[in-house]
Image: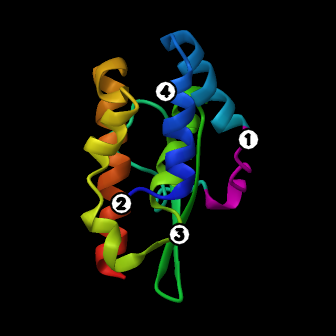
Amino acid sequence: MATEAFEDIAETFDFLDDWEDRYRHVIDLGRAMEPLDDAFKVPATKVNGCASQVWLVPEVADGVFRFRGDSDAMIVRGLVAILGALFNGVPVAEVGKIDARAELGRLGLNDHLSAQRSNGVRAMVARIQEVAAAA
C-alpha cells in the first residue's frame, strides 16, 4: 500500500549496509525538503509529543492528502520527509488505512530510533491520520 516514493526509500535502505549510512540518508532526505515558511511555524501546526520542534501543514485537494513539514532537528526533518513519502499523494480516505508502524518497520526504524524519536514519529502519524479523518 506504500507509495512509489516510499518504495524508493525502502529500496535505498535495503541497499545501505549499516545504520550510519542509513541515518545519513535520512538526514539527506530532510535536507532535500523545501523548508517550511516561518509563517506556518505556529502553535496550530506544531506537533505535540515530539522532543524536537515539528510542524506539519496538511492540505487536501481533490480528495488527495498532502502535507508540508519541518523540524529544528535534522534527523527529525528527515523523518518528516519519510512520512511525506509515505502519505503524500494518497487519497484522503486511504490515509487512515496505512499501517505506518509496519511500513517504517520495513526500514528498520522501529528498532533504531530512540524512545523519544519513536514517540515523536507516533505523534506525527497520529496528527496526519487525525487531519485526514476530519477532511
Q: Is residue 134 above or below residue 19?
A: below
For the residues labelled 4 and 2, the Cα–Cα distance comes to: 18 Å
For the residues labelled 3 and 1, the Cα–Cα distance comes to: 18 Å
Range covered by the magenta-colored residues:
32-40
| Residue 19 falls inside the magenta stretch | no
- Give percent across and percent down for residue 25: 62, 26
- Can residue 55 be spotted in the picture? no
Left or right for 129, reference 85 = left
For the point 49% across and 13% down, the residue is 19
For the residues labelled 4 and 3, the Cα–Cα distance comes to: 24 Å
Q: Earlier in the sequence, mark 2 or mark 1?
A: 2
Name which residue type carries label 4: Asp
Q: Which residue is mark 4?
A: 14
For the residues labelled 2 and 1, the Cα–Cα distance comes to: 24 Å
Q: Is residue 71 above or below residue 116?
A: below
Name which residue type carries label 1: Ala
Question: On residue 32, which mark appears?
Answer: 1
Cβ–Cβ below 8 Å for labels 4 and 2?
Answer: no
Name which residue type carries label 3: Gly
